[in-house]
Image (cartoon, rainbow, N blue to C red):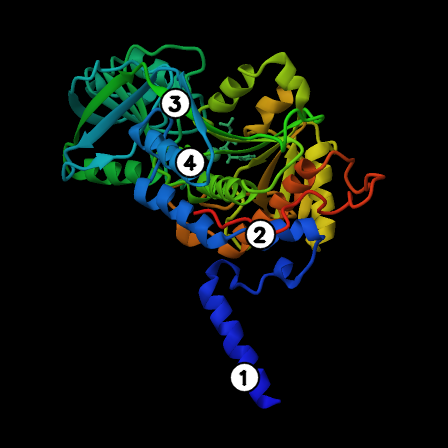
Amino acid sequence: MKKIISRIAVLALFASILQPGIAFALPNKAGNGSAFDKKITERFDSDRAMEHISHLSENIGPRVAGTEQELEAAEYIQEELQNYGYETKTEEFGIADRLEGELTTSLNNEELAIRVATGSASTKGEDFTGKIVNSGIGLPGDFSKDVEGNIALIERGEMSFWEKTENAMNAGAAGVIIYDNTEDLVPVTPSLGDNEASIPVVAITMEDGQKLKEEMANEEVNATLNIAEISDQQSQNVIAVKEPKGKPTNDDDIVYVTAHYDSVPYSPGASDNASGTSVALELARILQPFPTDKEVRFVFFGAEEIGLVGSQQYVSGLSAQDVENSLAAFNMDMVGTGWDQATALYVNVMDGSPNTVWQAAEAAGERLGNDSLKLYERGASDHVSFYEAGIDAANFILRDPETASLEPWYHTPLDTIDKISQERIQTNGELIGAAVYDTVRQDVPRGKPKNTPNSNTDDYLLNEDPAPVQ
Ligand code: BES
Ligand code: ZN
């Protein structure tokens, strides 16, 4: 008996060494779910997902819309999809001009992290140097004569960015630096509304602002500002289509599996959204060899963080027929945070009411014994673009079940892979994968077996396991 047990233990150890992706003692691996769920849950490999997150967030890093890094990420996604056997398409589009700049101070010649105000003037790419002058919170009385031709340092708060800017312009300032009044790790993007400033306006963090103020009490501190307009930039969506089995098909439905791969400035975007990208890639890999009744489109969006631009571009390019045939859009955005409070997988839908995506997810949750799902009314990701076109869509995102808070390092430089939970990537990948597969595998209403022999389970799945895809 003892011998047998130890033999089993050795075999189990070997199995786990040979198949690192399923070495976890994760709930769904215990055998929950229908036969068709297991096609997904047994294949979803969070080791591979973690490699994608590592490549995107560590090797590439921040992937801001329009930058080389965003393009590099798109190329990586495209190559991966091709390795899985897909033909891919890249959809390029122009993005709005934006201002970008550098701010260096005479304090150790340090370059500070900045955000340039929308509506700011540029220095036309040329250096402007001036003395930094403490100008309080930017009330008219806060400006000394000294500020004329120099740079006003103003604390955020109490009035709008535009009011501060207008007062600085009236006082003759040549530029404005606004420092934050909260402890955020990255500067805010100051909005001037629809106003245009005649001088450059940038924001820095509270920490940097306080450091400057301390130093200015001892000595004169100068700043060199260089703001340039970046124009004619491109972003891109990457698309791989899985055709339905056999043609002609009597099922014209289209199902989308989507994620954005760009990030905000200064953030490696491991959670937001290398996590969703990695799950979408892994689902593309494991679904590839399985025949499905419906067409599945894997769409990876660029330029989400600057206003859902990639998904709007994609959806606006769909034909009326495609829109009509579109059954459901699954969007994954932040599905792997390791933040201990984010234990619920929110299913965000625009109008808060159950739709096809929610129903598929809820049913998958029941089959897999996963009760972490929460239906919620929220936009703010690429599901909005599908919703606006009349397509059932939902966004999957991990949040605190009570407060709906996101991880505290959201949109900061601390959104790194060490704070991703591989276990949650596995669990959520399995759940969303099972929901997607259930939606696309056969043309019957969910949960209701078709009235034909063998049709309620795996009737058209391959008899043998498909060859593993690299
Ligand atoms: N990853 C977030 C997703 C998100 C979804 C955040 C739901 C909060 C709630 C996404 O990348 C994001 O940052 N969205 C922006 C809005 C978007 C229109 C630029 C946001 O919420 O600030
Ligand atoms: Zn974001």
Against 59, residue 378 (above or below) is: above
Q: Nearer the viewer, mark 4 or mark 3?
A: 4
Left or right position of 391 against 315: right
Provide the residue designation for mark 3: 235
Q: Residues within 10 Å of mark 4 (few under 14, many from 20)?
A: some
Q: Position of residue 285 (x, y in %)?
A: 50, 43
Question: Is the CB of mark 3 within 8 Å of ligand 1?
Answer: no
> CA–CA distance between discs 1 and 2?
30 Å
Q: Amino acid at mark 2?
A: Asp
Position in image of residue 99 (x %, y %): 31, 19
Task: Examine the rendered structure and indicate whether residue 258 appears above or below residue 231.
Answer: below
- Mark 3 against mark 1, which lies toward the viewer? 1
Taking the image as drawn, is residue 410 in sight? no
Report the residue marked by disc 2. Answer: 465
- Foreground: disc 2 or disc 3: 2
What amino acid is labelled 4 in the image?
A: Gln
Q: Residues within 10 Å of mark 3 (few under 14, many from 20)?
A: many
Amino acid type, label 3: Ser
